[in-house]
Image: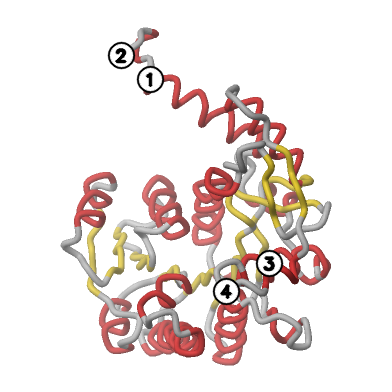
Amino acid sequence: MSKTIVIIGSTGAQGGGVARAVVANKAFKKVKLATRHPNADKMKSLLQDLPGTKAVRVDLNDKFSLVVAFKGADAVFGTFNYWGTLAAVGYDEAKAVEMEIQQGKNVVDAAKEASVKHVVLSTLEDVATLTGGKVKCWHFTTKGRIETYARQQEIPCTFVRYAFYYQNFEALFQGDAQGNVHLAMKDHVLQTVDTEDAGKAVAKIFQEGPRVWAGREIGLAGDSMPVQAYLDIYNEVKQAGVQRKYVPEDWEEKAKNPVTKELAEMFYFYTDYDKQCIRDVSATKQLYPGMRSYYEYAHMQWYQQLLRLRPNGQDE
């Protein structure tokens, strides 16, 4: 019998990485990409890039649509987009929190009702509870509460917690005119991961199955360095203009600004609650030995950019 997997969030960073990895891994014969908009250009492009995949319409706010999509599926990957939900409700924080948690419950309940054999959820820590309410960091806390609910339902579930994405550095490392990169983080190590490599680790979890992974969690990471060490690599690769320099800022000041509040609280949790926020490079590489360091990732990106700019060794 052909094994089937349904992937939620396939047009995003995490779900897209999982979709590409699952197709390449060939652990599943049928790959369904769950989406609200099957005919959207982004989904059509993804389907062209991943032959043999199929788009299936779901709405995370509609449990019935999820049950229909999950029927006959052996496995489900679920990820949730707090930022998208926040925008959808007009940036009403309370509504966004309630909606995302309910979306997570809908996925869990639908998987249980459809008798899915293995569910992998991308979750994070319940920061509000772990910090005694000092900070909320809702884009973490909502996912932590989804994980708690999933555990209570006693379904065959695995929880993956992604480290800070390598891909985020392109936006955060631009710096000011003097090259100063301001982050609300102490002089502390930052665990990071490439979303494509993380997808390959998740594909391996699906391949090994619930007998090995049910009830377990893993913090996915490919590197762990102080922020300036990442900047040194970034400076080397970019080879242009102002050199970036890390300038740590006070997280409490950043948290006063609604625009920077979520990231400030996240970086506070990363540093002051690091023992409760485990992203394990060693365990991740044991699961997927091909996991690249940031140095390897950045140089590969630079090399690929050169190839695009100078095909066959010539300038366009």
Q: For mark 2, give the secondary structure.
A: loop
Q: Determine which of the numbered discs, if any, sits on residue 219 in the image.
A: none
In the picture, measured across the screen, residue 274 lies left or right of residue 294, that is right
Q: Are marks 2 and 1 in contact (CB under 8 Å)?
A: yes
Residue at the outermost front position: 177
Q: Nearer the viewer, residue 167 or 281?
A: 167
Mark 3 or mark 2, which has the lower sequence index?
3
Mark 2 or mark 4, which has the lower sequence index?
4
Q: Are marks 1 and 4 in contact (CB under 8 Å)?
A: no
Mark 2 or mark 1, which has the lower sequence index?
1
Mark 1 or mark 4, which has the lower sequence index?
4
**Location of mark 3 (residue):** 254
Q: Residue, x 71% and y 63% (percent of image)? A: 267
**Location of mark 4 (residue):** 258
**Location of mark 1 (residue):** 309
Report the mark closest to the observer, 1 or 3. Answer: 3
Q: Image quarter for residue 161?
A: bottom right
**Location of mark 2 (residue):** 316
| Image location (x, y in percent) of residue 313 | 39, 8
The amino acid beneath tag 1 is Leu
The amino acid beneath tag 2 is Glu
| Image location (x, y in percent) of residue 189 | 79, 51
In the picture, measured across the screen, residue 129 lies left or right of residue 21, that is right
250 over 302 or under it: above or below? below
Q: For mark 3, give the secondary structure.
A: helix
60 over 231 or under it: above or below? below
Q: Are marks 2 and 4 in contact (CB under 8 Å)?
A: no
Query: Gap in Å between the C-alphas at discs 1 and 4?
Result: 39 Å
Question: Is residue 213 visible in the rendered structure shown here?
Answer: no
